[in-house]
Structures are given as C-alpha cells and as structure tokens.
Amino acid sequence: MKVALDAMGGDYAPHKIVCGAVEALKQFKDLAVTLIGKKKIIEKELLKYQHFERLDIIDAPEEIEMYEAPARAIRNKKDSSIVKGMDLIKNKKADAFISAGNTGAVMAGGLFKVGRIKGIKRPSILINFPSIKGQTIVMDNGANADCKPENLLEFAIMGQVYSRKVNGVDKPRIGLLSIGEEKEKGNQLVKDSYQLIAKDFRITNFIGNVEGRDIFNGRCDLVICDGFVGNIVLKTTEGTASYMFELLKEAFNKDLRAKLGAFILKPYLKKMKDKVDYRQYGGAPLLGIDGVVIISHGSSDEIAIINAIKVARKTYKEKIVELIKEEVKRDGE
C-alpha cells in the first residue's frame, strides 16, 4: 500500500511528520510512503534516519497556511503539498492521502481534485469518540456547517459502512443527535432527518434521537449530526478532557500524600489518558470523497501520524470507498 503524506502540514511539521513516516515503515513491511513538501527540508530531516527503499519525496515548494481561504488556496497553489497529494489520489498513484494541515483546504482539495462519490452530495468528517463500551462514531465533525436532511441520511449510510467494516460492529446502533430522546424533539433539520433516516431500508438499526451524553455511555455506535454541532461537540470534548486532567494534576501535587497516591495510580491514569488522547485515534476519514483521505489533528506528533497511517490502511484494505459506492447505488431497490 502506498500512502502520500503531507510533510508540511501541522504544528510540528516536518520533523514529527517525517519521524512518524519512518516509524510506520518499520512497523508495516507492505507500506510505501511518499512525503510531499519542500524537498530540501525533508531531505535534511531524513538524515537523522537510515535510508528506506520504500520512501520517496515529491517536491512541493508552495505551502497552504492555516489562515488561507481553502478554495482559493487550492486553485492558486498548484505546487502545494495538499494539491499534489490529491493529484496522486486522483491519478491512482497513491492509495491514501494524509494531512494535518489546513482542514478546509483538504476538504476543498478532495472535492475539486478527487471528486465526490456519485450520489453523495456532501462529504463528512468521521471521528471515533471514546465511550464506556469502546468507541462511538460521530459525523459530521465540521465539514458541513449547514446541512439538509438528505445530507444527514448520507452520513448515516457512510458511517454504517465504516462502523461495520472498520470498527467491527455487525449491526451498528445509529442515533440522531438532538435535545431529547422523544421523536418530536429537535429543530426542523433533526425532525425532517428523523423521518428520512427512519424510513430508509438501507439503515438497519436506527434507534432514534440521542443526546450528547449518549456518545460516551455506550448507548449507540454511530451518532449523526450536522458539522456545526459536531465540531462544537468535538472541541468541547477536547476542552473538557484537558480541564479534567489539569484538575487531577493540581490535586495530585497538593502535598506528599497526594503525590504518593499519584505514584500508585500512575499506570491506571495513563490508561485513562490514552483513552481520551486524540493521538491514539490518529486521523479522521473524509468519507464521501472518491478516494481515501485522512485528516489529522493540527497538533499531530509522530504517534498521531503512525495511527493516522493505521486508519488509512484499514480504510483502504476494507474497501470502504467501494462499499459506500455499492450502498449508495442500492437507493433505487
């Protein structure tokens, strides 16, 4: 499998990105990596490591900054790492593209360069959230601030495929995020989406409306919402996790007895921290694009990059794009 990796995207590019690529090559003998970015800078980073035959570089002298307007940047910066990465996917010269750079630019590049799966109007960012019983998928997480009911139905169809094949849930429980469990609760988008999802024969286990707490209590496997709400859920969850660990850190540093307790609990606290650490989840698939595109966190380090490559591998090997195409075609049955 060949993965194209944006070496210039993210807060810790290129050194952490390059490090992650090298470590992933050690782990996966069937993996080849193309690093895309400023060639001389990447080559300098690679001097820290031994030579790998399964690694090459594509020079991309231009860089899309985080503040740039996505669509304009994709049009104007043809020699950027994101544009060149998308070209590799479009021309079947790479099996997956991963970037921790400008999320909007990755979205725009996927749409304009690679294109949508026929029958999918809006691609969606899928993220696995930790829950008591494992993981809960939430989508969309920011790709589409404004949605129509048919878009939420598409998210449910794509998320159901991913949950089955990647998360290993045979009959995923699908919930629609609302302000109450009752069928009548929610805004007009939620009410109309409820009707559409409930009557679509492709959705096998729709459990109705769910609330924010159900993402974490194991009640469902897949939660559907528009990207505006989903992104707020994501950022609030990240903020809450950071806040809780700061409170724990403060409590365990109060006195000697607290420090002793922290020492005893250290291995258990690490397991807890790993469960909510975004690095362990690697990256978020951009579903609905006609190719495997993974969006990584802007603060991704080498651990996050290795895990993003794992997500890309599984998404590619389980043929998620092809399965979504098949499921969308079943609309007319």
Image (cartoon, rainbow, N blue to C red):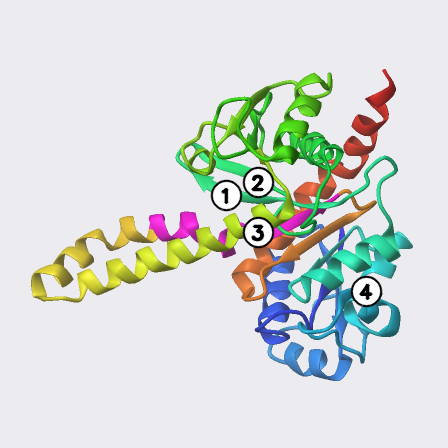
Give the spatial CA distance, label 2 vs label 4: 25 Å
Tags 3 and 2 touching, CB below 8 Å:
no
Magenta extent: 271-287
**How far apart, in angstroms, are the residues tagged by discs 3 and 4?**
20 Å
Mark 1 or mark 2: name the one nearer the start of the chain. Answer: 1
- Which amino acid, mark 3? Asn
- Check disc 4 and report its element: helix, strand or loop: helix
Residue 94 position (above or below residue 288): below
1 or 4: tag closer to the N-terminus: 4
Residue 65 position within the rendered picture, expressed as x and y whole percent measured from the top left: 70, 75
The residues bearing labels 3 and 2 have C-alpha atoms spaced at a distance of 10 Å
Q: In terms of depth relative to the viewer, which is nearer, 50 or 303?
A: 303
Magenta stretch holds residue 18: no
Question: Which residue is the site of mark 4?
Answer: 71
Q: Is residue 308 above or below residue 154?
A: below
Does 48 sit above or below residue 87?
below
Q: Which residue position is annotated with label 3?
A: 231
From the image, state whether disc 1 or disc 3 is nearer to you: 3
Nearest to N terminus: mark 3 or mark 2? 2
Looking at the rendering, which quadrant does residue 164 occupy?
Answer: top right
Q: Are marks 1 and 2 in contact (CB under 8 Å)?
A: yes
Please state the horizontal and vertical placement of residue 301, each as a whole percent of the image: 54, 66
- The amino acid type of the residue labelled 1 equals Phe
Callout 4 amino acid: Ala
Identify the residue at image location x=62%, y=68%. 17
Amino acid carrying label 2: it is Val
Where residue 138 is drawn, which disc sits there?
2
